[in-house]
Image (cartoon, rainbow, N blue to C red):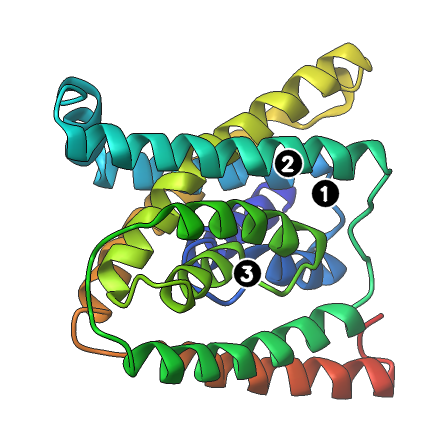
Amino acid sequence: MDYINAAILGVIEGITEFLPISSTGHLIIAEQWLGHRSDMFNIVIQAGAILAVTIIYWRRLLDLVLGWREPENRDYAAKLIVAFLITAILGLVVKKLGFELPESATPIAWALIIGGIWMIFAEWAAARRPSHKQITWLVAILVGIAQIVAGVFPGTSRSGATIFVALLAGTGNRAAATEFAFLVGIPTMYAASGYELLKTFKDGGAAGEDWTALAIAFVVSTIVAFIAVKWLLAYIRSNRFTLFAIYRIILGVLLLGMATTGLIA
């Protein structure tokens, strides 16, 4: 039964990691019924979703590496590195401050609702700007900060925060903003997974980890995320993110109602 629950969590992670609806928020709520998981479990299955994006963008990544002599590729890669470094440094600061994820649904519900309203406004504002694919230094810096904000406030959504910060900061093209947000997420989540793994081994917690369940969730997350991202990239070519904003608001209201009635903690 625990393996089935792990697979379900893998499905939830795979669907929600890159759709702007908050994977961490969904996992925290799901764990109230499926059992609490370690921080390492949650971070490593996120790495499974990141692996899916790595596979999808492998040509783009290879082009950035092999074509580093081209000024355009060097500039883009430098901005990815800066965004990642900002996230990494701020992430270490947050860790040192002893930040803990909330275990109750109420703060997640509010983050979903506020984030949904903000998404509608952000896309409305971005639609009034010229559509272009350029990623500026301001976008790179703000995307790096947005990743940490999303991590500190579960329910915000890392992909949602980074995509819409990019749109508001000057990248008026949904596809370009989404690509940059996803590519920044690759080193970010791999680094987070590696950090958590090293910490677990160092603290001697590896013996207590159910590696089979984690492996199942990782594989399921990778497969489901691959399908979800392929669908999303096709969807945003001709559709706005409004559907996801409405979903967030409805889910947030439902969670507040369930928390008030005692159905969830």
Identity, as a three-letter code, of the amino acid under mark 2: Phe
Foreground of the two, 240 or 123? 123
- In percent of width and height, residue 216 lies at 49, 35
- In percent of width and height, residue 134 lies at 23, 53
Report the quarter where the C terminus lies: bottom right
Residue picked out by circle 3: 157
Q: Is residue 210 left or right of residue 65?
A: right
Identity, as a three-letter code, of the amino acid under mark 1: Arg
- Residue 41 is marked as 2
> Which circle, 3 or 1, is nearer the viewer?
3
Estimate how packed mark 1 is, as few (under 14), some (14 to 19) or many (20 or more) residues with alpha carbons within 10 Å: some
Identify the mark nearer the N-term, 3 or 2: 2
Q: For marks 3 and 2, give the CA distance.
A: 18 Å
Contact (Cβ within 8 Å) of mark 1 with mark 2: yes
Q: Identify the residue at horizontal 69%, vertical 64% (top origin).
A: 29
Q: For marks 3 and 1, give the CA distance.
A: 19 Å
Q: Quadrant of residue 56?
A: top left
Q: Identify the residue at horizontal 49%, vertical 46% (top origin).
A: 141
Secondary element under disc 1, as helix, strand or loop, is loop
Residue picked out by circle 1: 37
Q: Quadrant of residue 196?
A: top right
Is residue 98 depicted above or below 108 in this figure?
Answer: above
Q: Is residue 58 left or right of residue 112?
A: left
Q: Identify the residue at horizontal 56%, vertical 49% (top origin).
A: 147
Is residue 69 depicted above or below 13 in this figure?
Answer: above
Answer yes or no: is residue 213 visible.
Answer: no
Estimate how packed mark 2 is, as few (under 14), some (14 to 19) or many (20 or more) residues with alpha carbons within 10 Å: many
Identity, as a three-letter code, of the amino acid under mark 3: Ser
Q: For marks 1 and 2, give the CA distance.
A: 6 Å
